Amino acid sequence: MSVSGDYGIVNQIEFQGRSFAGASVSNYGVVQTGDVVYTKSPLKSNPYGIIKTNKEKPGIVSTLYAVYHPKENAFSDFIQVYFEQHARMNNYMHPLVNKGAKNDMKVSAENALKGPVCFPSRIEQESISAFFSVLDNLITLHQREF
């Protein structure tokens, strides 16, 4: 699996036509449905990486990704919605990340989620996530029309 800024967590073979896994995947992280994944890979709009939720089948990701199992009071789909706003993600990660000499990210899996967040109740998280899911589906339908 890999993490895409536009498409979330995707199956590499289905999405890119092949796997980029190394010779051994024994140290890869297992990603269950509903897990949250952080990738340090910088994108133009997210120089400190991105956080996405696995909404598909379980799979594995390389050691470049940190995998988290949300606590009971956090809804994983909401976590993705919360961090999809570029400014929020960048402001959250900026104090947690140190850039190395080769412009690589120096942040441990433990430290990547140590920043403060303000989440509503679990029920509200589920409602907000459902609203954004419907909105995303409507946008997709309208894009197909054009």
Image (cartoon, rainbow, N blue to C red):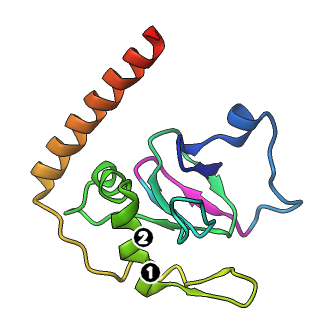
114 vs 117: above or below: below
| Lateral position of residue 109 relative to residue 135, left or right | right
Identify the residue shown where x is 85% and y is 60%: 22
Q: Percent position (x, y) of residue 76? A: 33, 54
The residue beneath circle 1 is 94
Mark 2 and 1 residues: CB-CB less than 8 Å, in contact? yes
Q: Percent position (x, y) of residue 114? A: 36, 83
Check the image and name the residue furthest to the top.
145
Identify the residue shown where x is 69% and y is 63%: 62
Q: Is residue 30 magenta?
A: yes
Region in magenta: 27-34
Question: Disc number at residue 90?
Answer: 2
Q: Percent position (x, y) of residue 2? A: 64, 51
122 vs 96: above or below: above
Q: Is residue 126 magenta?
A: no
Question: Disc number at residue 58?
Answer: none
